[in-house]
Image (cartoon, helix red, strand yellow):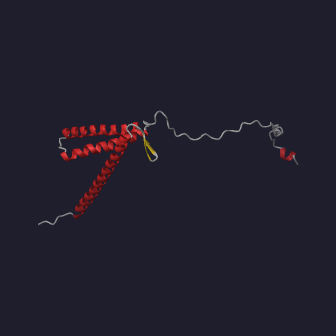
Amino acid sequence: MSNNNNDEATGIMIAFAFVGAVALMIMVVVYALVVFLAAILTVLSLLAWDSPLEVGPVEITPEEARFFVGAGMASAAVCPLFVMMCSWLFEFRVSDDAWFHIFLGSYAFGSIILTTKAAEAGAFDNGVPHYNVEPLPPPIDVTPRELTSPEQPPSPPSEFRYATWDDEEAGR
């Protein structure tokens, strides 16, 4: 029997499997946190549906609340259709257990991401632009001062003349 096993390749495969498992665990934790956050924000949005709701320093307006729920519902409708189209196009079957997570995840991620992007774009500013403007410099003092006569300009230099060969001797 041949003892031709490559231990380095086995170690590399184990390392890749470990990295993949850690990445999958991180994705599951992020998914759970986003769904939990979306559930809380949905309840707050339903409470702010007709009148503004203040939660600490944050105020949720009815416009923002309706947009949040509407964006989630639109995402929950579009994303599963895209998954169905891809499963038909690439000929793979989506597990029946996965559909619940597809709907829930698309609602959660869609509502949070779309509302965040709309707020960044200024969709909820009610026509009040927010500009990052630097403050103006202090005003210039324009009170009249007493005029003084200008200083006398320096006298012009004496007339210029070119040197000659015997200038040195003439000065002695």
Task: Pick the residue in front: 66 or 102.
Answer: 66
For residue 149, above or below residue 56: above
The residue lying at 37 percent from left, 42 percent from top is 47
User: Where does the N terminus fall, quadrant-wise?
Assistant: bottom left
The residue lying at 22 percent from left, 46 percent from top is 98
For residue 7, above or below residue 86: below
Task: Pick the residue in front: 139 or 16.
Answer: 139
The residue lying at 33 percent from left, 37 percent from top is 70
Left or right for 141, reference 150: left
Q: For residue 139, what is the image quadrant?
A: top right
Task: Pick the residue in front: 171 or 56.
Answer: 56
Left or right for 137, reference 146: left
Q: For residue 104, what is the image quadrant?
A: top left
Q: Is residue 95 visible?
A: no
In the rendered image, residue 38, in percent from the top left (x then y), is placed at 34, 46
Considering every residue shown, the one lying at the far right of the view is: 172
Left or right for 156, reference 79: right
In the rendered image, residue 7, in percent from the top left (x then y), is placed at 22, 64
Q: For residue 44, what is the image quadrant?
A: top left
